[in-house]
Image (cartoon, grey):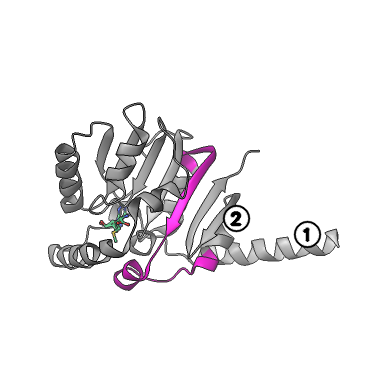
Amino acid sequence: MLKQSAKSDRKKMSEAGSIKAQLPKEGAKMQKPMSSLAFNFMRIIMNIRKFFRDFDKEIAFAEPKKGDKVVDFGCGLGFNTIPLAKLIGSGGKVFAVDISPKAVGIVKKKLKKHKLTNTECMLSGSIAEIEKLSIDVVYLHNTLPLIKDKQKALSEIDTVLKKGGRLSYMSRLGSRVYGDDNLSNQQLKEILCSEYHFKLIKDVKEHFVFLKELD
Ligand SMILES: C[S@@+](CC[C@H](N)C(=O)[O-])C[C@H]1O[C@@H](n2cnc3c(N)ncnc32)[C@H](O)[C@@H]1O
């Protein structure tokens, strides 16, 4: 029985490896932010979709705590950034990262309006600059389909997360429409669980939380 399961684990791993190998490897530095027109279109869609989202519930799913360090990778209009900054409080830190200067500008204005000083906005297509093994939770919501170099992004997430840290992941229809939908949720789960040693700990309506496993 055990032998059988080890065999199927290995099969899964090699299948996941081949999925990983198929992911596009375009350098993140090469990725350009979307055009102004495309960004404004996305902004309209996001502003309509926000009426169907419960942001407090979305962020609470990965169980962030006061004082945590978190990353909002692809922060967009800051729908998750602002409630996160409020939740983790002055002892914590949010890194709000986006490749689009427009998005970063919008989030900066919102932070100022809400008098939040615990958030660092980073205009970047990557989170490699963040200290290794320092982050409690990475939020990757509705962004992976838009990221060109998905392998690099997943490796960076693995690198910055502490052991026992969590990745909160969702890619709703909107992001799959204006991004490239070449990675299914099933493939993502297989890659993260076999190549990066994450464990899927929550899965509700295609919102996933992955735990970076302890040794
Ligand atoms: C659909 S929005 C999602 C915003 C937010 N996470 C949410 O769920 O409301 C996706 C964002 O990802 C950003 N993005 C795309 N590629 C990126 C990359 N390589 N690095 C950082 N941000 C990226 C886009 O500029 C856009 O603002």
Write the residue at 24% across / 40% down: 121
Classify mark 1: residues with Cα within 10 Å, few (<14), some (14-19) or many (20+).
few
Residue 130 part of the magenta-drawn span: no
What amino acid is found at the position of numbered circle 1 in the picture?
Ala
**Ligand 1 found in image quarter:** bottom left
The region drawn magenta spans: 159-187
Q: Is residue 9 left or right of residue 192?
A: right
Residue 178 belongs to magenta span: yes
Question: Which sits in the foreground, 41 or 194?
Answer: 41
Q: Position of residue 156 (x, y in %)?
A: 44, 46
Q: Residue at x 47, y 47 (%)?
A: 62
Residue 190 sits in which quadrant?
bottom right
**Rendered location of residue 185, percent (x, y):** 50, 66
Q: Which residue is mark 1?
A: 6
The structure residue drawn at horizontal position 62% and vertical position 56%, both measured from the top left corner, is 194
Measure how far apart labels 1 and 2 are at the Cα level. Answer: 14 Å
Position in image of residue 209 (x %, y %):
51, 52
Residue 55 visible = yes
Helix, strand or loop at label 1? It is helix
Residue contact at pointers 1 and 2, CB within 8 angstroms: no
Instruction: Tell me if the residue at label 2 has its CB under 8 Å from ligand 1.
Output: no
Decide which of 86, 25 is in the foreground and name it: 86
Instruction: Tell me what residue is drawn at x 31 percent, y 65 percent.
Output: 52
- Location of residue 120 in the rendering, given as x and y in whole percent from the top left corner: 27, 36
Q: Which residue is under mark 2?
A: 193
Q: Is residue 127 visible?
A: no
Q: Secondary structure at mark 2?
A: helix
- Neighbours of disc 2 within 10 Å: few (<14), some (14-19), many (20+): many
Q: Quadrant of the N terminus?
A: bottom right
Kind of residue sitting beneath label 2: Cys
Q: Which of marks 2 and 1 precedes in the sequence?
A: 1
Asked whether, in this view, residue 22 is left or right of residue 76, the answer is: right
